[in-house]
Amino acid sequence: MRKKLVVLTGAGMSAESGIRTFRDSGGLWEQYKVEEVASIEGWYRNPDLVQRFYNERRRQLEAAEPNAGHRGLVDLGNAFDISIITQNVDNLHERAGSKRVLHLHGLLTQARSSKDPGLLIDIGYREILQGEKAPDGSPMRPNIVWFGEAVPAMEEAADIASKADIFVVAGTSLNVYPAAGLIHYVPATTPVFLIDPKPVTVYTNHKVDYIAEGAGKGVAILAEKLKCLAS
């Protein structure tokens, strides 16, 4: 039986694909204040601005391509039973070929009802038009979990993490909660690997093997390290 490899990915995973993050931009995301475009208060205050922002992100995503890190995780699926939990709202894991991807913070290529979080609409890379309605008549909004909102997929993510034989953190500082708390669900004897070019402090009793590289090179190094753990 193949070992269960669980990978938690963050914004650094997609950086090499040209997807910028607000944490590298002094609290700005594509020159917008985060609270303006990534909070529920921002949506209530100025929904037209928020729609324009995510319409722009969708166009940016359409032009982006999966990088070597995304493709390297697909290759690891040949040796391991791999599940990916991602904080990213892009679909680059899926476009690279990963089959089991859980999006904690939503997905850019989906919209949803403002009234019913479970009423999802696949919109691909098109714009959500000003005043556009969901099938239930409520304003259509991006399917993004904003600051100030609950993370519906956390329970499923915690269950996946609790069954990990190997746990990998790639491209996230583990500063964004509740996602950062997933490491506390990982069994105490499970080896943990962390891929990030910048120093990261992880508050855990696990022994952590640090790989100080970006996503592409880091996943390649990880693959070499995991060869002895595959069976």
Image (spheres, rainbow, N blue to C red):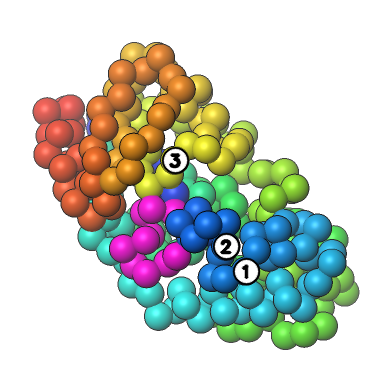
The quarter of the image holding the N terminus is top left
- Vertical position of residue 6 compared to residue 132: above or below: above
Residue identifier under label 2: 28
The answer to whether the residue labelled 1 contacts the one labelled 2, judged by CB atoms less than 8 Å apart, is yes
Q: Amino acid at mark 2?
A: Leu
Residue identifier under label 1: 32
- Say which element carries label 2: strand
Please give left or right for residue 187 compared with residue 58 in the image: left
Please give left or right for residue 65 compared with residue 132 in the image: left
Q: Amino acid at mark 1?
A: Tyr
**Mark closest to the chain's N terminus, 2 or 3:** 2
Q: Which residues are magenta?
A: 11-20
Q: Is residue 40 visible?
A: yes
- Say which element carries label 1: strand
Residue identifier under label 3: 173
- Which of the 4 image quadrants contains residue 128? bottom right
Q: Residue 97 location, x and y as percent?
A: 32, 61
Residue 30 or 147: which is nearer the viewer? 30
Q: Amino acid at mark 3?
A: Ser
Which mark is nearer the camera, 2 or 3? 2
